[in-house]
Amino acid sequence: MPPSQYADYLVFAQRCSKCHSLARPLNSGIDSDEYWTLYVERMRRQPASGISVADTVPILRFLHAYSIEQRKKKELPPGEQAKPPPAPRDPLAPSGSTPAPAPLPENGQR
């Protein structure tokens, strides 16, 4: 985070963490300023949020900058294709083991 965003981040962190983890908005995938405006306004109206009308400006400014950074990370260089996701692993298997077997059909037959 650039130093110029730190003050905005502090307002975001202080106000938004009162009701939920910061991971909730940061991992939401939202990158629309219009949607963020509606979302922050809805959160501001929650009695326990402590978000004032004045707080919405730095919060939205931080979310705008954060969204831009997230979009940049999603962009691929020309000619590079997105890699397919890895095969699912059996969560009970030890680390480094083979992928999980394909699920059985509904009737239990192979």
Image: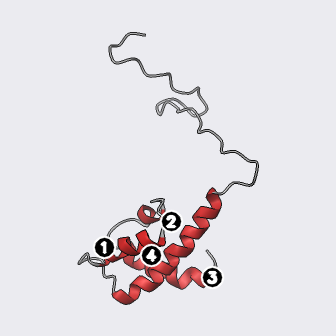
Of callouts 2 and 3, the N-terminal one: 3
Locate residue 61 relative to residue 42 in the image: left or right.
right
Element type at mark 1? helix
Locate residue 52 relative to residue 102 in the image: left or right.
left
Q: How far apart in space, not on screen, are marks 3 and 4 (Cα)?
A: 15 Å
- Residue identified by numbered label 3: 3
Q: How far apart in space, not on screen, are marks 1 and 4 (Cα)?
A: 17 Å
Of callouts 1 and 4, the N-terminal one: 4
Tell me, for residue 31, which label it has, or none: 2
| Amino acid carrying mark 3 in the image | Pro
Q: Where is residue 40 in the image (x, y as percent from the top left)?
A: 37, 75
Say how many tags the image has. 4
| Amino acid carrying mark 2 in the image | Asp
Instruction: Identify which residue is drawn at 43% across, 67% down.
Output: 22
Q: Position of residue 27 (x, y in %)?
A: 47, 59
Q: Which of the 4 image quadrants contains residue 21?
A: bottom left
**Crowd around label 4: few <14 · some 14–19 · many ≥20 (10 Å):** some
- Residue identified by numbered label 4: 13
Q: How far apart in space, not on screen, are marks 2 and 1 (Cα)?
A: 17 Å
Q: How far apart in space, not on screen, are marks 2 and 3 (Cα)?
A: 21 Å
Q: Which of the 4 image quadrants contains residue 46?
A: bottom left
Tell me, for residue 42, which label it has, or none: 1
